[in-house]
Image (tube, rainbow, N blue to C red):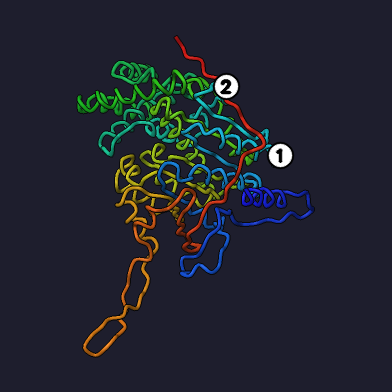
């Protein structure tokens, strides 16, 4: 409780209405010791340099280790102290985290900037169209295929891109000729995801009389190639595509993504307005709905960040993205979000239970790329010995002098050993962690954050009969 009061006092002092409020360029995650301090003589604050955070942070820890409360603490500081735009992906429907984010928005004067995206409570959710803002047609294709599970099958993924490209580019071309300036929607694309739909698109393109437009000819050729591809693969891809598009355009996801014309969230980001987006994805109710919502949101953000990067611009207020249970939100291509977003002042914090979940989601090579592109690593309690052994390597080696008895007496021998043992990570208590980053290597305990004064009570759910 004392530590909780210290954190609240720390935040309050920084938010006093002074002419020149104190600006700090770090985010506190707890207290502990530098691993170089073997005797643990100096108890210190463990702070993440916000400039280094642009290199992103990934973390792993078992259920109940304290990952979500760490996100609460960091996001609260980003909103209240640093004044960042913040996105939180919450697959657990964590009302404590929602209350914390909303309270931080209210206390920092950003209540109107707060948005809730929730397929669980669509009547309370913002409605947005992920396809309304784009520079390249391929961005729209990316949003569609991000939600398709490929299980590491690149050939399957490439055909999914080809089919989606044929539909998207054909529809955009037709809309240009009939002067229909409304944005594409998942519902519209769903109507053409299949053999008959693609054939209809080809027929509509052939009716347009403009021999000088090479795009028309190219689209007809593309559709012919798609329809003439391997029948088994085409059938499987179209089936997966239709399943995803069905969920995107109907039901819970369709209620927030399906029929919207605008994307107010992305508009505000691109116009350098302050915005805080809290995304609830109900993994316990429907894992598929949860995963699709998270992946489409991140794909949408990736495109927005890419457009900023192309024109060499930064987000005016900086952008902090928090992904809880991150392995559920990974898709083919997300590795580029981790290795190319730094220049736009974007900071990603992705926490998950196990590195093996990353491999399962995007394959070993892409998982290694994501981990390798993160400057900071946080490890909380791990239960898998292999994961603990991999994590222990980040602490490096230490030099020891061992006494050796020989015929010449007692001699000292220099040896090297791992600074951490796997059991050190497997024996961590809740909230305890190891951090390895550009700031150094630390062992600590996250700051307790206590309860919020503002508590959001979710609406009661009534079973449909």
- Rounded to the nearest angstrom, the CA distance separating label 2 from label 1 is 25 Å
| Residue highlighted by disc 1 | 109
| Residue 132 on image: x %, y % | 52, 29
The mark lying in front, picked from 2 and 1, is 2
| Residue 95 marker | none
Which residue appears farthest toward the bottom when viewing the image? 408
User: In this rendering, is residue 224 above or below 302?
Assistant: above
Quick one: SS at disc 1?
loop
* Looking at the image, residue 393 lies above or below residue 276: below
Q: Which is more toward the observer, 150 or 271?
A: 150
- Tell me: 458 left or right of 143: right
Q: Tell whether label 1 touches label 2 (CB within 8 Å).
A: no
| Residue 28 seen from this side | yes
Tell me the residue that label 2 is attached to. Answer: 459
> Which of 101 and 204 lies nearest the eye of the viewer?
101
Few, some or many residues within 10 Å of mark 2 (<14, 14–19, 20+): few
Residue 307 visible in rendering: no
Tell me the residue at 39%/34% (across/down): 146
Residue 288 lies in quadrant: top left
Name the residue: 59% across, 39% down.
269
- Residue 354: give x, y in percent of width and height: 36, 45
Residue at left 28%, top 36%? 151
Badge 1, how many Cα within 10 Å: few under 14, some, many 20+? few
- Between 120 and 31, the residue placed more toward the observer is 31
Q: Secondary structure at mark 2?
A: loop
In the rendered image, residue 156, in percent from the top left (x then y), is placed at 26, 33
Please state if 302 lies on the left or on the right of 452 as rendered.
Answer: left
Return the disc, 2 or 1, that comes first in the chain's sequence.
1
Q: Is residue 20 above or below residue 84?
A: below
> Can you say whether 217 is above or below 409 in the image?
above
Q: Position of residue 438 (x, y in %)?
A: 48, 62
């Amino acid at each position: 409780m004392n530590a909780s009061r210290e954190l609240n006092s720390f935040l309050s002092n920084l938010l006093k209405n002074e002419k020149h409020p104190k600006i700090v360029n770090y985010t506190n995650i707890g207290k502990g010791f530098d691993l170089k301090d073997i005797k643990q003589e100096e108890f210190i604050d463990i702070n993440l340099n916000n400039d280094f955070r642009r290199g992103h942070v990934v973390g792993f820890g078992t259920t109940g280790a304290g990952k979500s409360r760490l996100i609460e603490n960091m996001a609260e500081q980003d909103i209240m102290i640093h004044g960042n735009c913040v996105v939180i992906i919450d697959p657990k429907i964590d009302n404590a985290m929602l209350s914390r984010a909303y309270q931080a928005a209210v206390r920092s004067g950003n209540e109107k900037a707060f948005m809730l995206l929730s397929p669980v409570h669509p009547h309370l959710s913002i409605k947005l169209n992920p396809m309304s803002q784009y520079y390249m047609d391929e961005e729209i294709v990316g949003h569609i295929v991000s939600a398709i599970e490929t299980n590491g099958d690149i050939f399957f993924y490439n055909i999914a891109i080809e089919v989606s490209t044929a539909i998207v580019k054909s529809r955009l071309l037709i809309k240009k000729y009939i002067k229909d300036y409304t944005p594409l929607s998942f519902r519209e694309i769903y109507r053409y995801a299949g053999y008959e739909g693609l054939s209809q698109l080809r027929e509509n393109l052939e009716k347009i009389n403009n021999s000088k437009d090479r795009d028309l000819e190219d689209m007809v050729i593309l559709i012919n190639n798609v329809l003439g591809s391997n029948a088994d693969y085409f059938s499987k891809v179209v089936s997966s595509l239709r399943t995803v598009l069905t969920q995107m355009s109907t039901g819970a996801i369709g209620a927030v993504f399906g029929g919207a014309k605008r994307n107010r969230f992305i508009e505000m980001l691109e116009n350098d307005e302050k915005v805080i987006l809290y995304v609830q994805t109900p993994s316990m109710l429907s894992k598929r709905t949860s995963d699709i919502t998270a992946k489409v949101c991140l794909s949408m953000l990736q495109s927005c960040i890419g457009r900023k990067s192309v024109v060499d611009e930064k987000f005016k207020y900086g952008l902090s993205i928090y992904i809880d249970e991150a392995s559920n939100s990974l898709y083919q291509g997300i590795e580029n979000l981790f290795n190319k977003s730094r220049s736009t002042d974007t900071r990603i914090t992705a926490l998950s239970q196990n590195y093996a979940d990353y491999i399962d989601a995007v394959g070993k090579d892409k998982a290694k790329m994501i981990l390798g592109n993160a400057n900071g690593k946080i490890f909380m309690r791990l239960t898998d010995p292999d994961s603990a052994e991999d994590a222990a390597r980040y602490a490096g080696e230490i030099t020891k002098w061992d006494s050796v008895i020989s015929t010449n007496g007692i001699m000292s021998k220099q040896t090297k050993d791992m600074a951490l043992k796997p059991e050190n990570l497997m024996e961590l208590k809740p909230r305890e962690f190891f951090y390895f980053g550009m700031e150094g290597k630390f062992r600590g305990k996250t700051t307790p954050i206590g309860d919020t004064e503002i508590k959001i009570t979710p609406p009661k759910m009534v079973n449909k009969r």
